[in-house]
Amino acid sequence: MDWIQFIVFFVGVFGLFIWNRAEGRSDARHMDNKIDANRNVILEVHKETNALIQVIRDDMKDFHYRLLEIEKARK
């Protein structure tokens, strides 16, 4: 392999490497912008999920309390 072929090959690989890094940064900026645009929606979903989890926990406690009351009444 001649030196010129080696240099062309090296420059090509280096160019592809730089191009890939630039595309990756562009994709990351695009995703950051989408997340920032949807931040309020994400926070609302998070709050609703936490509220639902709390309701489920309260229902479970109430259910177990009722079971304990039934067991006490049976004895």
Image: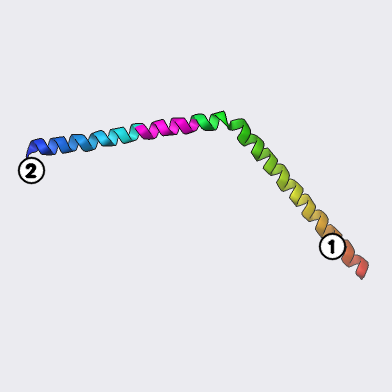
Color scheme of the displayed model: rainbow
- For image coordinates 71% across by 47% down, the residue present is 53
Residue found at the very far bottom of the displayed protein: 75
Residue 25's spot in the image, x, y percent? 39, 32
Q: Is residue 23 left or right of residue 48?
A: left
Residue picked out by circle 1: 67
Q: Amino acid at mark 2?
A: Met
Residue 36's spot in the image, x, y percent? 54, 29
Q: In the rendering, which numbered label is found on residue 1?
A: 2
Secondary structure type for disc 1: helix
Q: Earlier in the sequence, mark 2 or mark 1?
A: 2
Within the image, what quadrant is residue 69 found in? bottom right
- For image coordinates 75% across by 51% down, the residue present is 57
Residue 42's spot in the image, x, y percent? 61, 36
Residue 35 higher or lower than 61, as above or below: above
Residue 22 higher or lower than 72, as above or below: above
Span highlighted in magenta in the image: 23-32
